[in-house]
Amino acid sequence: EVQLQASGGGLVQTGGSLTLSCAVSGFTFDDYAIGWFRQAPGKEREGVSYMGSTDGSRYYVDSVKGRFTMSTDGTGDRFYLQMNSLKPEDTAVYYCATDDDVYPRSGPIARGPMGPPDAYDYWGQGTQVTVSS
C-alpha cells in the first residue's frame, strides 16, 4: 500500500522560510512523479510544484517561482519543498501526492504542467502552513 506522510508545516512571519517533507512508502517503482498541492480555506486545491524522474520534469506555479524549490534525497522515498520569502497568500494546507503512472505521456502531467488533483491516486494527510503578516 502506497502511503505518503507530509510534515514540516508551521507558523512563520512574512519573509520567513519553511521546508516541507514528504515521506513515501510502499511505492514499487524506482521512478517517481510527485506533486505538491495546497488548499487555502474556501479555495480549490492548487498545484504548486511537480517533479518527475522519467524525463526530469520540473514545474512550479508562477506564484512560487524563484521562492520554492522541490528536491529529493535521491532514494525516491523522501521529497522536500523548500519555501523561502513566504507571503501571507502562501497560507494553506500543503499536500504531497503521487500516482502509479509515472510516465509523462500517460501520467499526471499528460493533463497539464503538473496535472489536476484528480490525476493523482495517492495523497498525504496535509500539513498546515500559516504565514503571518
Image (cartoon, rainbow, N blue to C red):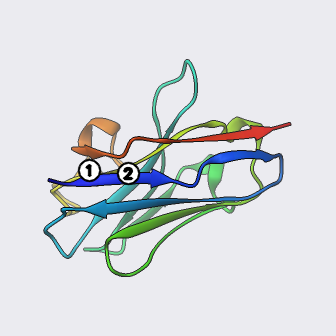
Q: Which picture quadrant has residue 26?
A: bottom left
Q: At label 1, which amino acid type do we have?
A: Pro
Q: Is residue 11 left or right of residue 23?
A: right
Residue 22 image offset from top left, x and y in percent: 43, 59
Label 2, secondary structure: give it: loop
Which residue is depicted at the point 35% across and 59% down? 34
- The disc, 1 or 2, on the residue closer to the chain's N-terminal end is 1
Which residue is depicted at the point 66% across and 37% down? 91
Q: Which mark is residue 108?
A: 1
Q: At label 2, which amino acid type do we have?
A: Met
Distance from the alpha carbon under mark 1 to that under mark 2: 6 Å
Which residue is depicted at the point 83% across and 53% down? 15
- Decide which of 67, 6 is in the foreground and name it: 6
Residue 38 image offset from top left, x and y in percent: 51, 39
Q: Is residue 43 left or right of residue 75?
A: right
Q: Most extreme residue toward the top, as rendered?
A: 42
Estimate how packed mark 2 is, as few (under 14), some (14 to 19) or many (20 or more) residues with alpha carbons within 10 Å.
Answer: many
Residue at image mark 2: 114
CB contact under 8 Å: marks 1 and 2: yes
Image quarter where the C terminus lies is: top right
Rendered position, 26 above or below 96: below
Label 1, secondary structure: give it: helix
Q: Is residue 109 left or right of residue 130?
A: left
Which residue is depicted at the point 19% across and 76% down? 30
- Decide which of 34, 115 is in the foreground and name it: 34
Residue 31 image offset from top left, x and y in percent: 22, 73
Residue 48 image offset from top left, x and y in percent: 51, 48
Estimate how packed mark 1 is, as few (under 14), some (14 to 19) or many (20 or more) residues with alpha carbons within 10 Å.
Answer: many
Q: Is residue 88 left or right of residue 90?
A: right
Q: Which picture quadrant has residue 104?
A: bottom left
